[in-house]
Image (cartoon, rainbow, N blue to C red):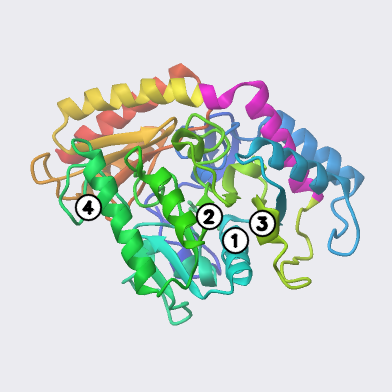
Amino acid sequence: MVLDPGPIPRPFTLKYFPFKAVEGRGARVLDAEGREFIDFVSGAAVYNVGINREEVVNAVVDQARRLLNYTSLYFYMEEPVRLARKLVEVTPGRFDKRVVYGFTGSDAAEIALTSSMNYTGKPWLLSFTGSFHGTLYLSLSASGIFAGRGRGAAVYRRVLYAEYPNPYRNKWGVDGYEKPGELTALALSEVEEKIREAKGDVAAVIFEPVEGDAGVVVPPAGFLKGLREVADRHGVVLIGDEVQTGIGRTGSMWAVEHFSVEPDLLLAGKALGGGMPISAVIGRAEILESQPLLGLGFTNMGHAVCARAALATIEVVEKEHLAERARVLGEHASKRLREIAERVEAVGDVRGLGLMIGVEVVRDKASRRPDRATALKTCWRAWEKGLLVTTLGSHGNVLRIMPPLTISMEELDKGIDVLEESLRDAVE
Ligand code: PMP
C-alpha cells in the first residue's frame, strides 16, 4: 500500500508505514479507513496536552472569529504580549527577558544563533554530536546529526561539534552509567578544547538538555552545570534548545530545571502551540535587543491565533499538573520497558526523562551494535497492531516513546504491551 504524496518532493515522502492521519483526540488518532491508533509519537512531540485538546481548539476558533492576526510588526496586538509575559514567568532565570517569536523550532534556533553572533560580534558556533536544531541555514549547520552526511552546499562552516556525553555509547568507550563523573569531565574538556580551537571567537554554544533526535540521550548529572560554567568563563552565550523537551515533556516544565541550569536563551516550539505552529526564543534582554532594526521581523510573528493556542496549552499544563503526570507515567513506562529489556535480547538500553523515552534496539546486549532494521520492523508491526511509534537516533535504531502527557494509564500499558509483541515479532 503506497499513499500518493502528490507534488511533495521525495526527501519529505520517505515514510516507514503508510499511515494517513485524518482525525484525533487525546492519545488516539484515526486513519483514512477509520482505524484507531494509540499515539506514542504525539505528532513528533507536539501534542503534550493531547490531540485536539478542547481548550486549545476553543481558543483557536474564538480568536479566528475575532481577528486571525494583524501584523504586530507595525502595530500591536494583545495576544502575543500576553503570551510573552507568560513565557517570561514560566522560564528559568529571574533576569530581564525578552521574547521573540517564530513558527517552528528551526527559526527559533536561527533567531537565537544570529542574536548571539550580533551580540558578541563573534563568528563561531559550538554544538554537539547528534544534535538537531532545525533545517534552516544556521540551525542545520549547527545540527551535529547532519555533520558528515550529505547536507548540501548551503552550510555555515564556522561550527564546531563537541562530543555529547552519551552514557551508552560515546567515542571514549566510557560507560557513563557506571562512571558519570568521568564522562562529564571528558566531555567538558572537549568543549574547552573546541573553544580554544576557535581562538575564543565563539558566539554561542547550543545544546539540547536531552538530545531528542540523537535517540533520547540523557547526559550525566553534572554535565550541563559544567557547561554553564564553561560558557560563563569564556563569555559564550548558552542556548538551551527545549523545542522537543519543553512544555512538561520530561517531568518538569523545562528539562534544564532537572539540571538546575539557566540558559541565556531558551528555545520553545513543537508542543508550545498545542498543535498550532509557533515557536519562541525567551532570554536575556541585552542579547535579544542586539539585532539590527527589523533584523528579526516576520510578517506574522506572534500570530494571534497561535499565541492564543499557546496560552491555552500552558494553562492546561499548569492546571492539570502535566509535568508531574509526565514524571509519574514516565517512571511507570520506563520500569515496564526495563523489564521488557530483561526479556528481549534486542533491547540494549532504555533511558529517558519523564515521558521522553528511548528504547535502543541492538543486535545483542554484549556488542551494542545498532540494529536499525529490527527497530523499523518493530514500528511496522506496531502500526499493524494499532500503535503509532517511530524511530530516531544517530543510527536510526531507537524507538521513540513520547505519548501525549494526558495519555491514560490503560492506553500507556496497552501501547507498551503492543510494543513488546512487536519487538518479539520483529526479531523472529
Ligand atoms: N530543535 C529540536 C531539539 C528539535 O527536536 C527540532 C525538531 N525535531 C527542532 C529544533 C526543529 O524544529 P522544527 O522541525 O519545528 O523546525
Whole-percent x and y of residue 277? Answer: 66, 51
Report x, y in % for residue 139: 51, 65
- Residue at mark 1: 112
Q: Which mark is residue 226?
A: none
Residue nearest the observer in this picture, 66 or 310: 310
Q: Which residues are magenta?
A: 304-324
Gap in Å between the C-alphas at discs 1 and 2?
7 Å
- Asked if residue 387 lies in the magenta stretch, the reply is no
Q: Pointer 4: what residue?
A: 170
- N-term-proximal mark, 1 vs 2: 1
First in residue order: circle 2 vs circle 3: 3
Q: Are marks 1 and 2 in contact (CB under 8 Å)?
A: yes
Q: Which image quadrant for residue 362? A: top left
**Whole-percent x and y of residue 158?**
44, 76
Q: Judging from the image, what secondary structure is the residue with disc 2 in?
A: strand
| Residue 210 visible in rendering | no
Q: Is the residue at mark 4 in contact range of ligand 1, meaning its CB lies under 8 Å from it? A: no
Reading the chain from its start, which is encountered first: label 1 or label 3? 3
